[in-house]
Every structure is written in structure tokens, then in C-alpha cells.
Image: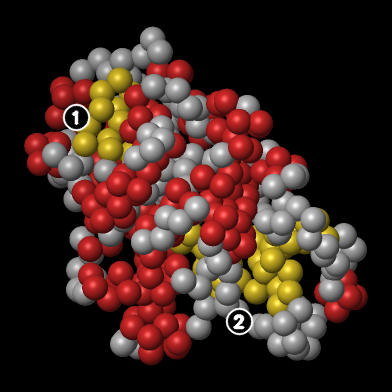
Amino acid sequence: MIGRHVELLLCEHLFQKKAILLFGARQVGKTTMLESLSCFKGLKVIFLSGDEADVRELLTNTTSTRLQTFFGDNQVVVIDEAQQIQNIGTTLKLITDKLKHVQVIATGSSAFELANRVNEPLTGRKFEFNIYPISFSEMVKYHGLLTESRLIDNRLVYGYYPEIVTNAGREEKLLRLIANSYLYKDLLSLESIKRSSLLEKILKALALQIGNEVSYNEIAQLVGTDSKTVEKYIDLFEKAYIIIKLSALNRNVRNEIKKGKKIYFWDNGIRNAVINNYNPIGSRTDAGVLWENFLVSERMKQNQYLQRNIACYFWRTSQQQEIDFIEEDNGVLQAFEFKLNPNAKVKISKTFSDAYNVKELTTVTPRNIEEFLI
């Protein structure tokens, strides 16, 4: 079985008198991971799902006595899709405060809903973790660097959703299922989302602009709405673990882009499913931006799992001088350029190096990918 980095984090935080919240999109492996968690061995564990009506009824407006009777001698209670349960924050607080022998773990594919419902009741009583599609480093640990490196072209097209990784030859069919059946499910449950066709149009427009600066006004004109609606939907896409927003670094240079945004997808396969393009990487005009999207999402996963408190940016001037990716850690900047061609020559912009204390630019290609992602 493919091990997940977040397993160790969860095991380290069990039985510390706090609820554990695990956020992640549908189908990224939350339940599968929890069902096989090594530190659950020897413990009595009960799994409940907020998708089931009787579970919702049990966990809504309940009492500690009723919960104790239902849980019995189980030491761990896992509540999947907890955002489906009304007043779930109060229920989790009740378990944490009154049933001190019980470790409760709540998962949510709709982070914005679950977070809103638990933040106030669980203040100071929770640990939060994220899980994403399988990562490059997780696959390297599973079957080695050489094998995974040989699969890079496949990953650039089909991505890392667990069902995709474990079903070679069925990627297109399964990606369509994930994109059509699960991608918008939580978003469409919100009262503020009225037009699913508009949601899909905006996401497709973003998918066609990965690696470029995104203008909310231009997208609004393209899909026939206003920029405020585009901004709202993009914010929801981000909270639903579909996209990543990268801001422009701007502090010193007069003509650098001040308020620019780039959009990337957490998974290359989902991006390609949105535009219905599964052509091999060697025949694609967007191969370079797929490589860029892959590296940004994989680096962000790795930073999250290693609990690095790092700010990430891109940099560009009005004269089109640019740096693909910049990380800031305690005031120290690192700059990276992403090139699919291993022989590409890249020099750091003098404008950038003069303005910022970064004298070295690291170029990431398929030849040195492990230095960036492991």
C-alpha cells in the first residue's frame, strides 16, 4: 500500500485531548488512509459517515451521555464528511471535553464548510491537517526514484489521484468520473452557488491559463459575468482544494507587477480533465506549463507535509522579466525556474538580483527533480 506522509503527523497527535481535523478533496484517500493507519493497531476504532442520515441525526444536538452509550468502549471515533452534520463543532467539543478517553477525528472534503462550523466551538481544542492527491515523494518512497522518474510524462497528463495511480490503462475514464461526479459536489451544495454551468466555465478558463497571470475582469468578460463573481468562485475553488493561488512578489522594483495572481491546479489530471485533453506530453503545446503546474503543486504538498511555514510567490515586471517560483523562509528568498527541457539555459534577472538578496537561481528539470521534491 502507498504510504501517505500525513500518517505520521496524525499518529504523533493522537490522545492529546484535542480533536483532529483532516481536510482534503473527495477521492484523495482520506478514509483509505485512516482505515489502514498503523497506530490504530490494538485500538478499538469506529468509523461513521456524515453522508448517512442516521449518523447525522445521532451527532446533531446530542448529549455526552448519548454519545458515550453509542461509542461504547471504542477509543477512536472517525467521522467522515463531517461538514454534512449540523452543529458538528459543538458535538466535537462535547466529545473532546466530556469523553476524554476518546480520540475523535473528523474529515471534511468541504473545508470551508467544516472549518466554519468548528472554528469557534473548537478554539484551542483541535489539530488541523491537509491531505492531497498522492505526491511524487510518496511514490518515490513506494517504488523508488528510478521507477517514478520514468512515469513523469504519465503524471503530467493524468496526475496523482489514488484511483488513477493504481489503475494504469483506465486513467481517462476514471478522471472523467472524478471530474464529473466529485469535483463540484461540495461547491454545488452551497446556497451561494446557483449556476453550475458558470462554475464550469470559470474553472475551464483558469485551466487554460495556468502559468499566466490571471485577470478577473478578462475571465468575467469571457464567461459572461462580473469580476466579483469570478473572484468569489476562485476563492471557493481554492478552499475546495481544486486550485492554488500564487501571488506576485513586489517590494523593491518600480515596474514589477504589484497585484498579479497565477492559478495552478492541485492535480495535473484534474486540470486536463477540465479541458478534456489527455494527449501525450510529447505532442502537447502546453507541456511546459504542465511541468510548471506539476512542480508548484508537488512543492506545495511537500511544504505542507513537512510543516514548513514558507510563503510562495512568482515575480514579473512589466517588461516581462520573470521568475517562476520564489519561496521565503524567515526572510530568506530562494528562486526557481522550471524547464521541461534539461538542456535549457537560464540566467537570473539582473533586475531581480539587484533588488532582492538572491544571487542564485535554481533551474528544476526532469534531471534534478528529486532535489526539489524530496
Tell me where residue 91 appears, x and y as whole percent.
25, 41
Give the alpha-carbon distance from disc 1 to disc 2, as whole Å.
Answer: 50 Å
Q: Is residue 123 above or below residue 116?
A: above
- Using the rendered view, name the quadrant where residue 32 is placed: top left
x and y percentages locating residue 366 in the rendered image: 69, 47
Nearer-the-camera pick, 207 or 277 = 277
Residue 67 marker: 1
Mark carried by residue 259: 2
The C terminus sits in image quarter:
top right
Q: Give the residue type that dot 1 points to.
A: Leu
Instruction: Please give left or right for residue 296 compared with residue 14 in the image.
Output: right
Mark with earlier residue (1, 2): 1
Residue found farthest to the front:
283
* Residue 304 x/y as whole percent: 57, 46
Which percent across, then down, holds residue 240? 38, 57
Which corner quadrant of the image does residue 52 belong to?
Answer: top left
Query: In front: mark 1 or mark 2?
Result: 2
User: Could you tell me if residue 79 is visible in this image?
Assistant: yes
Residue positioned 22% across, 32% down in the render: 48
On screen, residue 25 versus residue 337, left or right, reads left
Let me know if residue 13 appears in the view.
no
